[in-house]
Image (cartoon, rainbow, N blue to C red):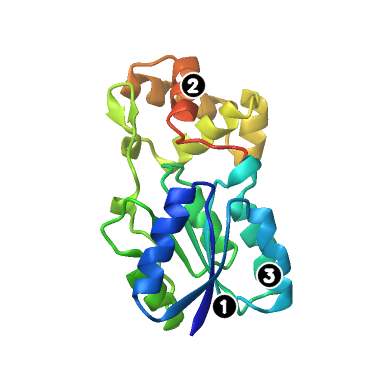
Amino acid sequence: MTRVIIVDDYRHTRERCAQLIQESGRYEIVAEFANASNVELPCMSGRVDFLLMDVCTADGESGLKMAEKLKPLYPNIKILMMTSMPERSFSPRARAAGCEGFWYKESSVGLVDVMDQIVEGKTVFPDEGELPNVCLGRINSSDITDRELQVLRLLAEDKSYQEISAEMGISVNTVKDHIKRMCAKTDLSIRQLVISAVEHRLIMPNY
């Protein structure tokens, strides 16, 4: 039987996930934690096969950062990251870290179905159309391109145009062009746009 640890800062979510997983009869819940930092010891002990972990856990701990730390040390442990946040960088980061899957809690695809596929050796990541959308001014976040979002993310980190230019390998004028297009599409000032993106959790730099 596959031994599972669940990490989520909300008790109700942990309990609901545990119920769904146990009802399948194919998994054993060995522990539940609110904080991602608590999974290190069980992983060291070898008593876990599958880690179901939220990106945003208790006390501001990042499940993604923990996955990035654990995967090279324990490659045989399957890791499925989950979130309800619309931050678009989470899924690509989970893939880059070597996680086997990423699941949105509001997804029409069932949690246990995703877990079963991962146990069978598959990787399961959401399609572009599954990404949660939020409203930014007069458009949806899906209307912001990845490059524009990258500029917006760096602005939220208080980077200057020159710093953004150097980090992205583009000219300062191109940075300005991205900003102008975003402001035109959303009908927001750049300051309003950054605030809106952070408030709607489209950008979550601490995770």
Confirm whether residue 48 shows in the render.
Answer: yes
Dot 2: element: helix
Q: Quadrant of residue 36?
A: bottom right
Q: Horizontally, is 119 left or right of 107 in the view?
A: right
**What mark, if any, has residue 81 been given in the picture?**
none
Measure the alpha-carbon separation of dots 2 and 3. Answer: 39 Å
Amino acid bearing label 2: Ile
Q: Position of residue 195 (x, y in %)?
A: 49, 21
Confirm whether residue 178 shows in the render.
Answer: no
Measure the alpha-carbon separation of dots 1 and 2. Answer: 40 Å
Q: Quadrant of residue 47?
A: bottom right
Q: Which comes before the other along the chain, label 1 or label 3? A: 3
**What mark, if any, has residue 195 been given in the picture?**
2
Q: Position of residue 14 (x, y in %)?
A: 47, 56
Amino acid bearing label 3: Pro
Q: Position of residue 203 (x, y in %)?
A: 50, 35
Between circles 1 and 2, the one closer to the viewer is 1
User: Which residue corresponds to the image point at 63% horizontal and 51% vertical from the top-left?
Assistant: 35
The residue under label 3 is 42
Amino acid bearing label 1: Asp
Q: Marks 2 and 3: CB-CB under 8 Å?
A: no
User: Which residue corresponds to the image point at 39% horizontal and 25% vertical from the top-left?
Assistant: 181
Q: How many marks?
A: 3
User: Which residue corresponds to the image point at 73% horizontal and 67% vertical from the top-left?
Assistant: 41
User: Split into 4 quadrants, where in the image is the C terminus?
Assistant: top right
Between circles 1 and 3, the one closer to the viewer is 3
Mark 1 surroundings: few (<14), some (14-19) or many (≥20) residues within 10 A: many
**What mark, if any, has residue 49 been given in the picture?**
1
Q: Is residue 158 above or below residue 7?
A: above
Q: Marks 1 and 2: CB-CB under 8 Å?
A: no
Q: Position of residue 75 (x, y in %)?
A: 64, 76
Q: Which comes before the other along the chain, label 1 or label 2? A: 1
